[in-house]
Image: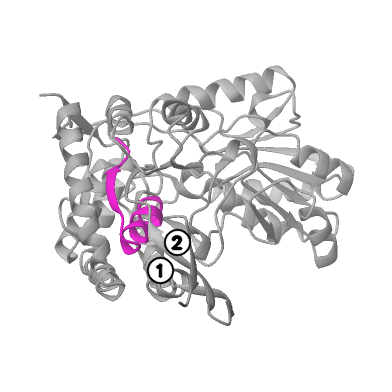
Amino acid sequence: MKTLTIINPATGASIGELAVDEPAAIAAKAQAARLAQPAWAAVPLAERLAVIGRFRAAVVAELETLATTLTQEVGKPIAQSRNELNGLLGRLDFFLAETGRSLADETVFEDTGLSEQITHEPLGVVASLSAWNYPWFVGCNVLVPALAAGNAVLYKPSEYATLSGQHIVRLLHAAGVPAAVLACVTGGGDTGAALLEQRLDGVFFTGSHATGQRIARQVAGRLIRLQLELGGKDPTYVRADADPRTAAESLADGAFYNTGQSCCSVERIYVHHELHDAFVEHLLASVSAMKRGDPMHDDTYIGAITRPAQLDVLQAQIADALALGASLRAGGQRLPGPGNWFAPTVLTGVDHRMTLMREESFGPVIGIQSVSGDEEALALMNDTRYGLTAGVYTRDESAARAILSRVAAGSVYWNCCDRVSPRLPWSGVGDSGVGVTLSVHGIRAMTRMKAWHLRQP
């Protein structure tokens, strides 16, 4: 039997081994889900939502245990693990409040003897291949609306966050989701590929662009619902009229929260040349105050890098930038000791010849480029194959709206960053993906519409 070893990235120590699902076991789970889904869909929506409510209560009851597991397997500081779980509660409240209205039958036309209606029906059996950096957020963004809408789900948590994924499944089963309706599939890339070979009605993936491309190729031609929530190279522009200290403190958090391991982390900063030096000094002060240490300590802000291979990516980007003329202002290297650690890193004098400004870093590294004004900043913000988020810091709302309306991104920010709301759709442009989660549109993404033409005899 193949096993998956769970490594604590902060210490390098093994914290457990799990059995990997072989193809035959995955096929059996898929078949069981197919058989169980119609009965689950027949359960009244109010009862399915009651299950989600009980799941929410269980998260509250076990929050400290769940946060500890999350920190141990991904290296996220414990305070940020608690933040993720507490933040999840608001998302669950949104789904509980809005699913009924989002999926209600709609009458769009009525005339003498004729009625036209729209209903929202579950897709059927869907696969959710989730991410490790926010396993509770990302996992539940799909699992909760999918189950509430009446689907069965084959859920593969990332191999770097499988213990948290198993907690999610355990609590949903205890809340009342039948075991066959929600099945956890355990393993790495080969396991994910085997899952995609099953008869599915939808595939929902969150992760890297490269893996998203492989998934798209594997399911190509099957004409099923495919959503890919992929990476970003998220830019922010600090205009000449912004307050440099306020912007720097906000963007330091936006770039380094979760140790920079977020698809919506700020990864490129463009600063008007008149503010550049002051902004950089304030940002360096903010970064120097970030405490790195044991992720289980309440005051730790910078945690471990979850995937050891990412250390090489960060080191290569920094070396490339320095070779092309960038200036290293802080950090720049791996840190000694067991586990996967990288110093918070700030570079100035960067430009778009450098991979640091073009390819996703997904770590505690930020490049800052001086610009002459709005038009140069806008051109640089759009000089990317990604389009997840983008932001502007300015006192002038009309200027912010004018710039952000021309940025190719799924989410835009004025005087804030690295923010997700359950009320707003989460989507991307270009290589940042296709499809949508969150908002009423993310709920409806778990269904297909049926058009009804009803004429009285």
Residue at x 75%, y 58% (from the top left corner): 393
Question: 79 or 196: which is nearer to us?
Answer: 196
| Circle 1: residue type | Phe
Residue at x 78%, y 55% (from the top left corner): 405
Answer left or right for 450 relative to 325: left
Q: Which residue is mark 1?
A: 95
Residue at x 23%, y 68% (from the top left corner): 43
Contact, mark 2 vs mark 1 (Cβ under 8 Å): yes
Residue 443 disc label: 2
**Above or below, 404 relative to 51:** above
Q: Work out whether mark 2 precedes mark 1 in sequence or the reverse, and give the earlier one.
A: 1
Question: Callout 1: few (<14), some (14-19), or many (20+) C-alpha neighbours within 10 Å?
Answer: many
**Above or below, 234 relative to 210:** below
Q: Tell me the SS state at disc 1.
A: helix
Q: How is the image coloured?
A: one colour
Question: What residue occupies the far bottom of the structure in this picture?
Answer: 112
Q: Position of residue 242 (x, y in %)?
A: 79, 60
Residue 85 disc label: none
Q: Which residues are magenta?
A: 137-159
Q: CA distance from mark 2 to mark 1?
A: 8 Å
**Above or below, 112 relative to 208:** below
| Quadrant into which the N terminus falls | top left
